[in-house]
Amino acid sequence: MGEYWVPVGCPCCASRTGGGTCPVCFWTDDGQSDVDADVVRGGANGDLSLTHARLNFAVYGASHPRYQDMVRAARPDERP
Ligand SMILES: [Zn+2]
């Protein structure tokens, strides 16, 4: 019995997509988390705060409406 490697959960949609740009919501994990979720960092996520991206994901199924056609559903092993 070994240890399982569990990919990190996306801070936006919580899918276990392992960091980087999440294929499920298109949020790019830049280390932002609950503690600074309201901050607009202006990096890979442009003018989106994490809070705003989470809201968008709830409404549009993507961290920003412009990503709606680029995202895919989370695979069973990626679901939070
Ligand atoms: Zn995500």
Image (tube, rainbow, N blue to C red):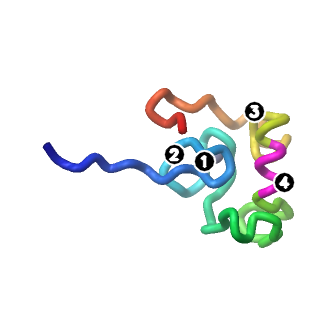
Q: In this view, does 12 lie above or below 57?
A: below
The amino acid type of the residue labelled 2 equals Thr
Indicate the secondary structure of the residue bearing disc 4.
helix
Q: Name the residue under label 2.
A: 17
First in sequence: mark 2 vs mark 1:
2
* Real-space Cα separation, disc 3 to disc 1, in angstroms: 14 Å
Q: Mark 4 points at which residue?
A: 52
Q: In which quarter of the image is the N terminus?
A: top left
Do labels 2 and 1 touch, CB within 8 Å?
yes
Instruction: Give the image quarter of residue 29.
Output: bottom right
Q: Where is residue 17 in the image (x, y as percent from the top left)?
A: 51, 45
Q: Quadrant of the C terminus?
A: top right
* Real-space Cα separation, disc 2 to disc 4, in angstroms: 20 Å
Task: Using residue 71 as the reference point, say whether residue 61 is left or right of it.
Answer: right
Q: Is residue 51 above or below residue 60?
A: below
The amino acid type of the residue labelled 1 equals Cys
Q: Name the residue under label 3.
A: 69
Mark 2 and ligand 1: say if the CB distance to the nearest ligand atom is below 8 Å: yes
Pair 1/4: label in front: 4
Q: Which mark is residue 22?
A: 1
